[in-house]
Image: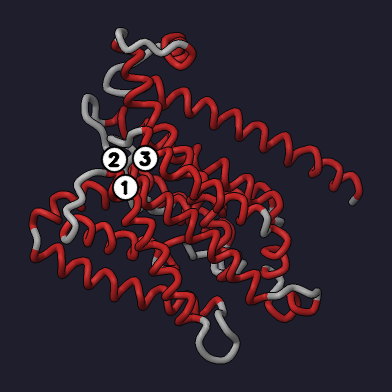
Amino acid sequence: MPDNRVRRAVALPMGLVGVAAALAGAALLSLAVGSQHVPFGTVLAALAHPDDAIRDSLIVTEVRLPRTLVGLLAGAALGLAGAVVQAVTRNPLADPGILGVNAGAGLFVVVGISVFGVTSLAGYVWFGFAGAAVAAVVVYAIGALGRGGATPVKLAIAGTALTAAILSITTAVLVTDVQTYDQFRFWQVGSLSGRGLDIARQGLPFVFVGMVIALASTRSLNALALGDDVATSVGQDVARARLVAAVAVVVLCGAATAMAGPLVFVGLVVPHVARIITGPDHRWLLPYAMMLAPLLLLLADVLGRIVARPGEVQVGIVTAVLGAPVFVALARRRGLAEL
């Protein structure tokens, strides 16, 4: 047993370094691959010494660098949010959207387009984040009603019910406003294309704060995984721990959804992959999920550029196509019934 612990103590940090290296390679690939291939040497030169007079340098710094940064931020946020929400709800089928975050963000983006005339992605970010936050607060408030407070089951039911209601309102607005629908559908599909550095700058503070909250909650998440009664018996304030974790999910998923639109399966599948590597210990599970999710997102984005040259398939479609069979395979292999 001591030998196994020693090997595990060495393997997990080394594995995290390996994932970080793979993520760096995926980021470099994202900068090099597209409708116009840019050699890796040119990519590095463009990053070190940007020159707007050189076409390849301009492509790297003005087009591909911003979308790569957004992919890194959104992916890390979704990976962490997925792992946290699965721990809080003790539901292996939970993803960040279970708290109504995606639906709330979508509704507020629709309102921003239809009522306030917002036309830019920079404007969508703030409406999307506000909608995600409002929806999650409402879900938590409903779930906290009654005996026992905000239990995992009540949160899941409240999130599902509110999502259905919000989607109905969103659909009603879109059906009666064709112009809003034309703009909204490009955000709704989930994409990294067309994102500028301003989007990354706006999302960075929220992602950073969410990361800090999530990573600081690893001990309480490990306690929650044992069940409310056991967590209480070891001195854990269950309600407070669940509330802090919910705040982290809202901030992370709200920022990611606002930046890149609703990206399905990333926050659902990646935590299970990380759990295969690390086991149930959230001290390792969260860092792995934070690294693996942007790795998946960037590779999916690159694949989307390759399969439809000179056009591209949006990353939200690629992650859905890749994520569904992977999740089915994981479910069959591990018999996911509970966490």
Q: How many marks?
A: 3
Residue sitting at x 45%, y 71%: 137
Q: CA distance from mark 2 to mark 1?
A: 7 Å
277 relative to 62 in the view: left or right: right
Residue placed under numbered mark 2 in the picture = 314
Residue sitting at x 70%, y 65%: 220
SS at mark 2? loop
x, y percent for residue 153: 52, 79
Tag 2: amino acid: Gln
Residue placed under numbered mark 1 in the picture = 190
Q: Are marks 2 and 1 in contact (CB under 8 Å)?
A: yes
Give residue 49's quadrant in the image.
top left
Question: How many residues crowd mark 2 within 10 Å: few (<14), some (14–19), many (20+)?
Answer: many
| Vertical order, 283 against 138 (above or below) | above
Please name whichever residue, 145 or 337, is drawn nearer the observer in this view of the structure: 145
337 relative to 57 in the view: left or right: right
Q: Which mark is residue 199?
A: 3
Give residue 193's quadrant in the image.
top left
| Vertical order, 118 against 226 (above or below) | above
State which tag comes first along the sequence, 2 or 3.
Answer: 3
- Report the residue that reaches farthest toward the right: 2
